[in-house]
Structures are given as C-alpha cells and as structure tokens.
Amino acid sequence: MGGTNRVAQDAGLSRGARVYELVREWIAVGQLRPGERLSEEDLARRTGVSRTPVREALKRLEAEGFVQVIPYRGVVVAEPSADEVADLCVVRDVLEELAARLAAQSVSEVELIALEQVQAEFEAAAASGDVQKMVEGNIAFHEAIWRASRNRVLVQQLRQLRDRIFAHLSAAYVVPERREESCREHREILSALRARDPERAAEAVRLHFRRAEAARLRMLQSNSPAIREHPA
C-alpha cells in the first residue's frame, strides 16, 4: 500500500490533508477493511510523515464517518449499518443517474475513447478474476462519467458517497456471474453515452446499481464467506 512519495510530493495539500486523502482512498477500495484497527504509528510509517498529521487526518475521518473510536480498541474503520448503506445508496443512485444524464449531453469524443480504454482494462481484469483491479477500474469508469457531467459539486458529492459504501457494494465481484454482468452493464452505459441519449444513460446506470445491490444482498442472505474474505 503505497503513499510515502505521494504525501511528500503533493505540496498543494498539508501533510494531514494528504494523509486523509490516502486513508480515505484505501478505505474506499477495500485496502483497509471495515472493523480493521488503524495504528497512528503504522500509518505514519506507510505515509512517511510524523504522527501529528496522521492524528489530524484520523480526526477528520472520524468526523465524516469513515472511522470510529472504540473503547479498548482504538481507531477502527467504520462499518455502516445495513440501514445506513441502504440510505446512502438511495441518494447515490439519484446522483449517479443525474451525472449520466449530464454526461450524455456533454461528453467529448476524447473522453469517450478514454472511457472505452478504461472499460477494456476492466473487462481484462474481470476475465482474469483480478478483483482488486476490477475495483480500481470500476472507480475509474464511474469517475470518468462524473467528470464528463461538468458539474464539480456533483462530482464532490458522489465521491463522498462512493467512499463510504463502495467496499460493501464491490464485494459481489468475487462471484464470476456478477463480474460478467457488470461488464455488460458498463457496455450498455457506454453505448448510451456514445448515442448522446440522456434518458437511456440514466436508465442504464440505474439498472447497473440496482443489480449490484441485489447481488450484494444475495451474498449477505446466503452468508457467503466471500464478503468476509474479500470485501472489495
């Protein structure tokens, strides 16, 4: 889990802010798992800073709900309740559909070509069963759509929601059938964007997230060990 050089090189942010960004990213992609204990000393070593900016970052992450302080355990990655995940998904779905509508109206040819390349890499990861690469590719795919919406506030809100729940929703990638479904759904979203069809793009995104949530719930109901073994 890299980080040292990224903290040192980014002069545009304070060290505490950069550590915050890195830890939040690690939580989002499942490199830090719900319930995992976070050590100031370990994070300082990983990011190449002193414990003071790490402490600053953890306080901010706690305030935003990404981590929590548990008596006798210390700081751990927060695990949203089922109700909280459901509530966050409702809001996320509305904003994702809006982003798709806007992107269909404003996406450039250059952005479409880049998005197709991201999708090709996502499908290669799916074919090889590389779940972590799929997680990273899925983030890149959806972020590209957000940016194409040309709405910075929307992008900011979607990032906040994504980072709270993505590790939970992406758990279903351990199931081969879901990997194949996700590839097909991404292709449909891409097709709608290339057709410049806002309503079709929004509908494709809506179905994509509905199916992802259904797959996650099936795994939970079956008490699948996959979530425990590979939550991302």
Image (cartoon, grey):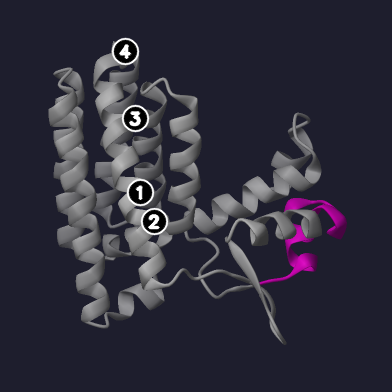
First of labels 4, 2 by sequence position: 2
In the displayed structure, does residue 26 sit left or right of residue 209? right
Where residue 15 sits in the image (x, y, percent)? 79, 43
Which is nearer the eye, 100 or 227? 100
Residue 84 visible here: yes
Label 4 amino acid? Ser
- Label 3 belongs to which residue? 145
Residue identifier under label 1: 91
What residue span does the magenta drawing correspond to? Answer: 38-53
Height in image: 11 above or below 21?
above
The local crowd at label 2, few if under 14, some if 14 to 19, many if 20 or more residues have their Cα within 10 Å, is: some
Looking at the image, which is closer to me, 50 or 94? 94
Q: Which is nearer the N-term, disc 3 or disc 1?
A: 1
Mark yes or no: residue 1 visible: no
Q: Main secondary structure of the magenta part?
A: helix
Q: Earlier in the sequence, mark 1 or mark 4?
A: 1
Mark 4 touches mark 2? (CB < 8 Å) = no
Three-letter residue code for mark 2: Leu
Query: Residue tagged by mark 4?
Result: 108
Mark 2: which secondary structure? helix
Question: Could you tell me which residue is drawn at 34 percent across and 44 percent down?
Answer: 138
Mark positioned earlier in the residue sequence (3 or 4): 4
Q: Which residue is mark 2?
A: 88
Q: Residue at x 20, y 44 (%)?
A: 206
> Which quarter of the figure has residue 46?
bottom right
